[in-house]
């Protein structure tokens, strides 16, 4: 049974981490597009660079957290320090626009994004994800993961509801300063609230030997189900990243919706597709099983994205957005809980890093590049603030729907794990 302070601490960390990632995933992109250059290609470069950073950071720092033994525990030091520096780096990002010429500004934006990603991945992707696995079991993991999804959805709701209005009234700089300060404050509060369970023995062998061991054939066979599941998660993520970095650009520039209207539509989709559905989906994931929930998510995601690409009115955009976002929530809860079920006890931080390898590097590099290529070659030429560029079209959503089918293929080979009901208490 999890203590109340653990639920609160994890929720705060998940909430403010999601705020920072939402800003990074969408508004770093729109900042570069609106402020530095309307060429979609630098966005794909920035997303790819941050994905590589997130992957390497999560594996290396996750493995380091597995081996760390301090008075504060093994995950908390990485969470506390990581969130503090994550907030500082977020606030510093918009200063990239102060550099000239455009090429230098793009380079600095990519550099600042990578620095922010290093601290965020250390604190959130590696340490917090491993901590959640430490304090849960397969019998209650879906519920805690669903609470994290609710916290994440609330954070996204706030960002998409308020960020557009902040940008329209005061510009990008205050938005990044506000989010950076929030990450520092709530990260420290949440990090101090959580308590770690009794520490197991440190992994045997050397640090680099622990990492190298995972890639030996015997280890790959031993963790066959885990890596098949990661392959399914990676293919899903590739499909998502074909359209997601360009979502607000599509709404603002292809459909000619003002930023406040575009973010309001996303607000509605998040409210109904994530916040109100996440906890019931978490309960169903624990009750029905991870595999059944994931399979249903694939079906409804394909339908939702296809319908969204055809939607033109605000009502149909909201309804179809709820559909594909709800399916994405179901997929995320099911596969994240499932992957945590398969973490080896002595390498949870390191294996949390492998989740990032498949769901970030293997997705955020090819996905945005495909989306950027589609936007450049099949998009609408435009000139924004005197700079040439391209507007993405509905094709990016149709391509993503087709790519989602591939996620179901490796899912078929993943075996259902036996249930364990012994709860952790912290």
Image: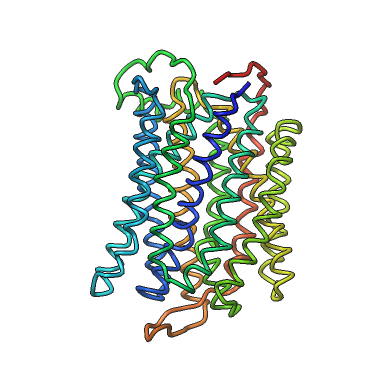
Query: Quadrant location of the C terminus?
Result: top right
State the image coordinates of residue 334 (x, y, percent, origin top left).
65, 38
Image quadrant assignment for residue 354: top left
Q: Is residue 386 above or below residue 202?
A: below
Residue 269 percent across, percent down from the top left: 67, 59
Q: Give the left or right position of residue 3, taking residue 285 as reference.
A: left
Q: What colouring method underlies this structural image? A: rainbow
Q: Residue at x 38, y 23 (%)?
A: 72
- Residue 152 position in % (x across, y down): 57, 47
Q: Quadrant of the N terminus?
A: top right
| Image mark count | 0
Q: Is residue 300 above or below residue 357?
A: below
Indicate the position of residue 143 as horizontal and vertical percent values.
66, 33
168 w.r.t. 411: above or below: below
Name the residue at 42% across, 72% down. Answer: 33
Residue 308: image quadrant is bottom right
**Front-most of 199 and 347?**
199
What residue is shown at x 24% (from left), y 68% (from top)? 104
Asked whether, in this view, residue 183 is left or right of residue 18, the answer is left
Q: State the residue at coordinates (36%, 30%).
A: 77
Q: Is residue 181 left or right of residue 150?
A: left
């Amino acid at each position: 049974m999890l203590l109340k302070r653990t639920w609160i601490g994890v929720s705060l960390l998940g909430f403010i981490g999601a705020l920072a990632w939402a800003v990074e995933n969408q508004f770093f992109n729109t900042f570069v597009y609106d402020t530095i250059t309307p060429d979609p290609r630098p966005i794909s470069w920035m997303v790819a660079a941050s994905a590589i950073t997130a992957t390497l950071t999560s594996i290396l720092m996750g493995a380091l957290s597995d081996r760390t033994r301090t008075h504060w525990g093994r995950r908390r030091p990485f969470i506390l320090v990581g969130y503090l520096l994550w907030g500082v780096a977020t606030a510093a990002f918009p200063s990239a626009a102060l550099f000239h010429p455009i090429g230098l500004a793009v380079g600095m934006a990519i550099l600042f994004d990578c620095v922010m990603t290093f601290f965020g991945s250390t604190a959130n992707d590696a340490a917090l994800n491993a901590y959640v696995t430490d304090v849960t079991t397969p019998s209650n993991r879906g519920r805690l993961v669903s609470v994290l999804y609710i916290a994440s959805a609330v954070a996204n709701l706030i960002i998409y509801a308020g960020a557009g209005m902040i940008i329209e009234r005061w510009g990008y700089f205050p938005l990044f300063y506000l989010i950076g300060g929030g990450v520092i404050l709530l990260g420290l509060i949440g990090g101090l609230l959580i308590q770690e369970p009794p520490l197991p023995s440190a992994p045997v062998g050397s640090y680099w030997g622990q990492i190298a061991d995972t890639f030996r054939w015997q280890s790959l066979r031993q963790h066959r189900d885990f890596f098949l599941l990661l392959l399914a998660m990676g293919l899903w993520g590739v499909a998502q990243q074909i359209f997601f970095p360009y979502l607000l650009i599509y709404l603002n520039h292809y459909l000619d919706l003002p930023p406040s209207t575009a973010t309001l539509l996303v607000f509605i989709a998040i409210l109904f597709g994530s916040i109100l559905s996440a906890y019931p989906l978490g309960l169903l994931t624990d009750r029905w099983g991870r595999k059944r929930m994931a399979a249903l998510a694939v079906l409804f995601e394909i339908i939702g994205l296809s319908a969204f690409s055809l939607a033109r009115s605000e009502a149909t955009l909201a309804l179809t957005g709820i559909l594909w976002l709800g399916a994405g929530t179901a997929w995320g809860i099911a596969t994240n809980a499932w992957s945590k079920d398969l973490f080896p006890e002595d390498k949870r931080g390191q294996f949390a890093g492998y989740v990032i390898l498949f769901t970030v590097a293997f997705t955020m590099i090819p996905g945005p590049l495909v989306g950027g290529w589609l936007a450049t070659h099949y998009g609408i030429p435009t000139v924004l603030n005197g700079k040439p560029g391209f507007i993405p079209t509905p094709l990016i959503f149709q391509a993503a729907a087709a790519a989602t089918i591939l996620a179901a293929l490796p899912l078929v080979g993943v075996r259902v794990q036996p249930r364990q009901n012994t709860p952790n208490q912290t």
